[in-house]
Amino acid sequence: MRYYFDIRDNTGLYPDEEGLEFKTQREAEVEAAQTLAGLAKDLATIDERQDVAVEVRTDVEDVFQAALIFKRGGTKQ
């Protein structure tokens, strides 16, 4: 099955035009988590962090969404 990993942030949606083939949804879930980890690393150096999500779909349907939400509590350091 081909899964597409669209990226959504505060500026909009960035669709995945190519997708990746996986035998199971679990493999696609792992890929989404790894993608989010990479995005979190890139966002860590930005002063104003923004929420970001990986929206996963197939050719037929939306499958799941994995999100990284930055919620700041207390004082900024």
Image (cartoon, rainbow, N blue to C red):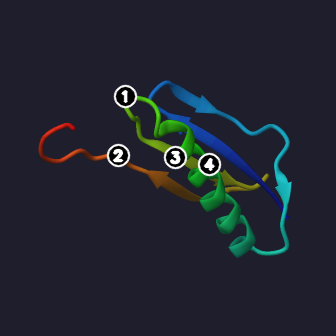
Numbered label attached to residue 38: 4
Residue at the disc numbered 2: 70
Q: Is residue 1 left or right of residue 51?
A: right
The residue that appears at 72% across and 65% down in the rendered structure is: 28
Q: Neighbour class for label 1 at 10 Å: few (<14), some, many (≥20)?
A: few
Q: Closer to the N terminus: mark 2 or mark 3?
A: 3
* Mark 2: secondary structure: loop
Q: CA distance from mark 1 to mark 3?
A: 13 Å
Q: CA distance from mark 4 to mark 1?
A: 17 Å
The answer to whether the residue labelled 4 contacts the one labelled 1, judged by CB atoms less than 8 Å apart, is no
Q: CA distance from mark 2 to mark 4?
A: 15 Å
Residue 63 appears in the rendering: no
Q: Name the amino acid, label 4.
A: Gly
Numbered label attached to residue 47: 1
Instruction: Name which quarter of the figure residue 75 lies in.
Output: top left
Q: Is residue 13 left or right of residue 1?
A: left
